[in-house]
Amino acid sequence: RRVIERTLHYSLHIPGDPIGGSALTEPLDALGRLRCIVRPRFARYNAQAETLIAECCAEIAARVQQVGASWVDWGAHRYVARPGDPAVEVWRKSSP
């Protein structure tokens, strides 16, 4: 989940692309669709992944709508981005 959030978060910098405008949100190609038919387990895991990706996109969209930016916590840092803005603010978490 954290890797998906981070990947979708970084797609915010692409001007004109929707939130989550990354390869993760693209539909399966012909080979992927064929794998879903031939391998039921692949189809099941792909459906679970698509659900998780959609949830992450919705969370990012809600943050952007509410505060105009999104963030992702990664290690000791928080990465803050605004849609279409090439700059990323990196905040270091402070110790209590």
Image (tube, helix red, strand yellow):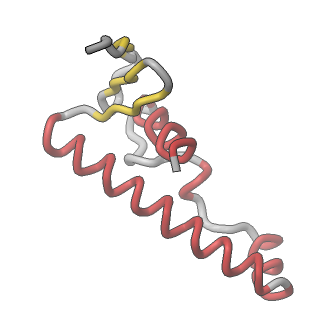
**Residue 9, quarter of the rendered image:** top left
Residue 2 location (% of width, % of height):
51, 43
Which x, y percent locates residue 81? Answer: 34, 26
Specify the quadrant of the image occupied by residue 64: top left
Q: Is residue 17 above or below residue 46?
A: above
Residue at image position (54%, 57%) is 25
Front-most of residues 9 and 18 = 9
Q: Residue furthest left?
A: 66
Q: Is residue 48 above or below residue 66?
A: below
In the image, residue 74 lies at what x, y percent? 48, 28
Q: Position of residue 1 (x, y in %)?
A: 52, 51
Which quarter of the picture shows residue 36?
bottom right
| Residue at figure coordinates x 59%, y 59% from the top left | 26
Query: At 30% from the left edge and 35% from the top edge, which residue is drawn?
Result: 70
In this view, 46 is above or below 7: below
- The front one of 78 and 87 is 78
The quarter in which the C terminus is drawn is top left
Tally of numbered discs: 0
Residue sitting at 34 percent across and 13 percent down?
Answer: 91
84 with respect to 7 (left or right): left
- The one nearer the camera, 11 or 77, is 77
Side of 70 relative to 7 (left or right):
left
Q: Is residue 40 above or below residue 35?
A: below
